[in-house]
Image (cartoon, rainbow, N blue to C red):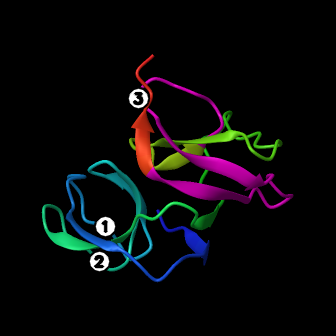
Amino acid sequence: MTVFVKRAEASNVRFPNDTGSDLAQYEFAVVGPYAAVADEVITAAATGSLYVQEGIHIETSDLVTGEDTFDTEGQEVYWDSTGQEFSDTETAGYYLVGYLIEARDSDGVIVFEKLRYAELITS
C-alpha cells in the first residue's frame, strides 16, 4: 500500500523490516516500534531506510470500508496492519499512527500527521 508524503524532514533511520513481508518504496507499515514509511524497497528481514520522524504529513485513500468517516480534524488515525488500511475507529489490534489534519474529501482522500511511534490498541 503506497502513501504520498506531503511534507517530511530529510532524516530517517535504518531498521530491520520485521513485518514479515517485503516493503515497497513509500509503503506505510508498523516496523518495530515505528509508524514508518519505507524510503526504499526493503525485503522481509532486511535492514533498510525508513522515514519515522513525527510530523510527516501522509495523504492516502486506503481506508477501511465502514471505518472511513474521517470528518473531524484532530481525530485519531489507526492502522489495520492486516488489511493495510487506515481507520477512524479504535479497534483492538490496530495501531494509533497519527492525527487527522485534512478531513476526507470527495475523492475519499485524507491527510494526517504521522506519529513517530505506533501505539498498539489492546482493548
Which residue type does callout 2 highlight? Val
The residue beneath circle 1 is 23
- Quadrant location of the C terminus? top left
Whole-percent x, y for residue 26 in the image? 44, 73
Amino acid type of disc 3? Gly
Question: Which label sits on residue 104?
Answer: none
Q: Which mark is first along the chain, 3 or 2?
A: 2
Most extreme residue toward the top, as rendered? Answer: 123
Place residue 83 in its image quadrant: top left
Label 2 and label 3: CA atoms lie apart by 26 Å
The disc label shown at residue 41, or none: 2
Q: Which residue is mark 3?
A: 93
- What's drawn in magenta, residue-wise? 87-116
Q: Is residue 122 left or right of residue 2?
A: left
Position of 95 relative to 41 (above/below)? above
Q: Earlier in the sequence, mark 2 or mark 1?
A: 1
The answer to which image quadrant residue 67 occupies is top right
Give me the C-alpha separation between circle 2 and circle 1: 6 Å
The answer to whether residue 45 is above or below residue 70 is below
Q: Residue at x 45, y 27 (%)?
A: 121
Which structural element holds mark 1? Answer: loop
Magenta includes 47?
Answer: no
| Residue 103 lies within the magenta run | yes
In this view, which residue lies farthest toward the bottom? 10
Residue 15: x and y in percent read 22, 65
Q: Tell me whether the residue at label 2 lies in contact with that at label 1, contact meaning CB atoms closer than 8 angstroms.
A: yes
Q: Amino acid at mark 1?
A: Leu
